[in-house]
Image: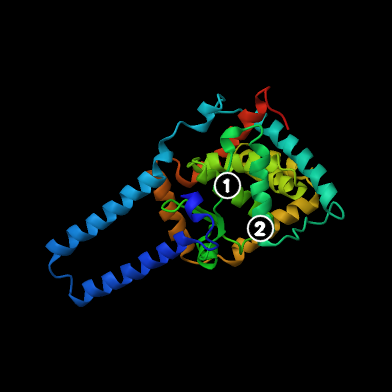
Amino acid sequence: MRYSLGFIPFSLGDFLYAAFIILLIFWLARRIRQRFKSPKMWIPDALASLSIIYFCFHLFWGFNYYRLPLHQSLEIENNYTTKKLIKLSESLIEKSNEIHSKLAKNDSAKVEYDFTKKELFDITIEGYEHIQKEFPELAYNGEALKRSLFSIPLTYMGFNGYLNPLTNEAQVNTIIIPYKIPTTASHEIGHQLGFAKENEANFIACLVTMNHPNLYFRYSGYTFALSYCLSEVYKRQPEKVKELTAKLHPGILKNYREVDEFWLKHQNPFEPLFQATYNRYLIVNNQSDGMKSYSYVVALLVNYFDDSRNSF
């Protein structure tokens, strides 16, 4: 599907969603106009239509939710100690500071991303070309990484991007801060390659960006992984987070703050509803922790880098 749709410059999947929404509105208007008469006719029709969509969802992509968990295929543990978490956090801070010093004017300046959206997409793909030398299973063939036509609605829904399971196109919300696009695009490509679970796609995004030849992408990757680790440290030892963040360059904190301010600016009363709906979607599709599964990437990171076979 990526080979057949990747060459199309726009998102066909977004057009399908738009057509579905329009048809649904017409269908509801017709039912209301008819005062929902003859339910024995339209209820079976509606259920039949939904069953076809559900079947296509699983046939085209959804069965990936039932794959062997990544920690098992990597032969690493899925639990970790606080000591190991803090050790990884300190390593990530050291590496993030090192890269920040190379990209920013001084310790207090944030890293600026002077790239076009197309350049960010092209460089993302270069990251997969680079990583496949060590991890052939991450070979990204049939590229279909696209801007979402629904970037504005996605922003107010609180999403960086998504994978269309019916067309296998990776959609990126290009309104978000450019600093976040490298990890977002890498995350969505991870989904395209069959890593359906959110924590696994996040781990793949970390792996690709942290090993990227481009220093800006490495910066995004290391600080992305660090943000998850610091969140987990806060849950276990809140007082330790102050000690760790004190070691971070103030410019890195400015990049974090820039992202937070962006999302605060677009908060709205409907966002929790969208988040709750997506949380239920994840639970239904074999991710029992729902949106909490995003943060489970820390378990993969801690155990992957704790393994003597792997290092920064």
The residue positioned 14% from the left and 70% from the top of the image is: 37
Q: Is residue 224 left or right of residue 214?
A: left
Q: State how far apart marks 1 and 2 are (Cα).
A: 17 Å
Q: Position of residue 193 (x, y in %)?
A: 52, 42
Check the picture and name the quadrant holding the C terminus: top right
Q: Which mark is residue 259?
A: 2
Amino acid carrying label 1: it is His
Place residue 205 in its image quadrant: top right
Residue 185 visible in the snapshot: yes
Of the two numbered discs 1 and 2 on the same chain, state the one appearing first in sequence.
1
Please tell me whether residue 81 is drawn above or below residue 288 in the rendered image: above
Q: Position of residue 29 (x, y in %)?
A: 27, 74
Q: Is residue 35 left or right of residue 308?
A: left
| Crowd tier of the residue under label 1, counting other residues whose Cα lies within 10 Å: few below 14, some 14–19, many 20 or above | many
Place residue 160 in its image quadrant: bottom right
- Between 53 and 252, the residue placed more toward the observer is 53
Reading the image, the residue beneath label 1 is 187
Residue 180 visible in the snapshot: no
* Farthest bottom residue in view: 33
